[in-house]
Amino acid sequence: MARILYSLCGDDTDNRFSPHCWKVVQALRHKGLDFEERAVGFTEIPALENGFSKTVPILRDGDRLIADSFAIALYLEQTYPDAPSLFAGEGGMGMARFVEAYSQSTLHPAITRIAVKNIHDMLAPVDQAYFRKSREPRLGATLEEIATGREAEIAAFAGKLAPLRTMLTHQPFIGGNTPLFADYIVFGALKWAFTTGNSGLLDANDPVLNWFERCELVTETS
């Protein structure tokens, strides 16, 4: 059976924007594993694989089903030990957990406020209704109210990447000379921002943008 990755998409199935799905895409490419990516909308997820998970990514690898991006990365590392490592040992796993906490506590809330209305507008109508109903109570405001603060969030966003920018003065990737899963965690967050209509978030000469492009190049050629 083919290796299948279920990824979140907008009304245009080519527009795949989930940061968590992008982490797994990068991890699979890093490992050099062939896979078929199947794009699904929010309201299609409950029916996938007999209701296996309420969220994507979901990876089917033969008879195995795995959900959650970090769990999938651990599975790939354990199942394909001869392929390039995603963690380079226990320390790399711990580092990735720290980077995940940084990304989800600092980058994700900002990107949500920047992109939430754009995300809604790019969804199919049935997914738009679900998205508004589920996100507005969680965020404590309407999507339109959140969007009024978008420009201030954009202005402050580059500063939230200061730790990464400082690190890049010493090494080309979070993982050192080559990227590891820790890199793909932050990559996924930025890919989410860029694919939801925010391509100008970073200056063209920002070292973080150069790092992002290096991550993309490494996995495209691996």
Image: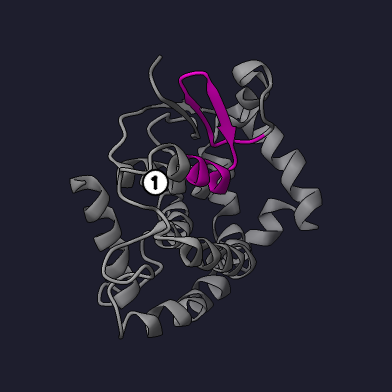
The spot of residue 42 in percent (x, y) is 61, 31
The spot of residue 147 in percent (x, y) is 62, 60
Quarter where residue 106 is shown: bottom right
Q: Nearer the viewer, residue 153 or 145?
A: 153
Q: Please say whether residue 141 is visible from this viewpoint.
A: no
Instruction: Classify residue 185 as left or right of residue 171.
Output: right
Q: Does the magenta stretch include residue 100?
A: no
Task: Identify the residue shown where x is 60% and y is 58%.
Answer: 112
Instruction: Classify residue 209 as left or right of residue 148.
Output: left
Q: Name the residue under label 1.
A: 27
Task: Identify the residue shown where x is 55% and y is 49%.
Answer: 70
Instruction: Classify residue 37 as left or right of residue 69.
Output: left
The spot of residue 165 in percent (x, y) is 38, 80
Task: Identify the residue shown where x is 59% and y is 50%.
Answer: 117
Instruction: Classify residue 140 as left or right of residue 185.
Output: right
Q: Give the range drawn in magenta.
A: 55-75
Coloring basis for residues = one colour
**In the picture, which quadrant includes the N terminus?**
top left
Q: What element carries label 1?
A: helix
Residue type of the residue flagged with mark 1: Ala
